[in-house]
Amino acid sequence: MNDGSPVLPWLVIRQDDNDNCYRVGRYATEEEARQLADTLESKGHKQLYWVERAARSTPL
């Protein structure tokens, strides 16, 4: 049964020095996504990383 929910609903997003945003990846759990975002943040680059839930798909 498909209720329109993404299989990998958690996104890690990166914002670079020029305010451009990119999706780094999709993850099954919020914890998994936060662990990656925290790891990337800890590397000391100027980029900003955050986690957000993907929007649900709307049926056609």
Image: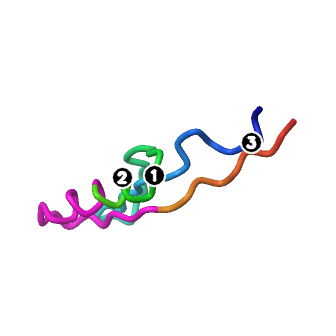
Residue beneath label 3, please? 4
Mark-to-mark CA distance, 3 and 1: 17 Å
Give, as a three-letter code, the residue at label 2.
Glu
Reply yes or no: does residue 26 show up in magenta.
Answer: no
Bounds of the magenta segment:
36-51
- Judged from this view, the residue extending furthest toward the left is 44
Q: At 36% across and 58% down in the image, what residue appears?
A: 14
- Which residue is under mark 1? 29
- In the picture, the disc for residue 32 is 2
Q: Judge left or right: residue 55 versus residue 18.
A: right
The colouring scheme, among rainbow, by chain, secondary structure or one colour, is rainbow
Q: Residue at x 43, y 49 (%)?
A: 23
- Alpha-carbon distance for marks 3 and 2? 22 Å
- Disc number lying in front (3 or 1): 1
Q: Which quadrant is the C terminus positioned in?
A: top right
**The image quarter in which residue 49 lies:** bottom left
Label 3: few (<14), some (14–19) or many (≥20) C-alpha neighbours in 10 Å:
few
Q: Are marks 1 and 2 in contact (CB under 8 Å)?
A: yes
Quadrant in the picture for the N terminus: top right
44 in magenta: yes
Q: Residue at x 74, y 42 (%)?
A: 4
Q: Amino acid at mark 1?
A: Thr
**For the residue labelled by badge 1, is the local secondary structure a helix, a strand or a loop?**
loop
Amino acid type at mark 3? Gly
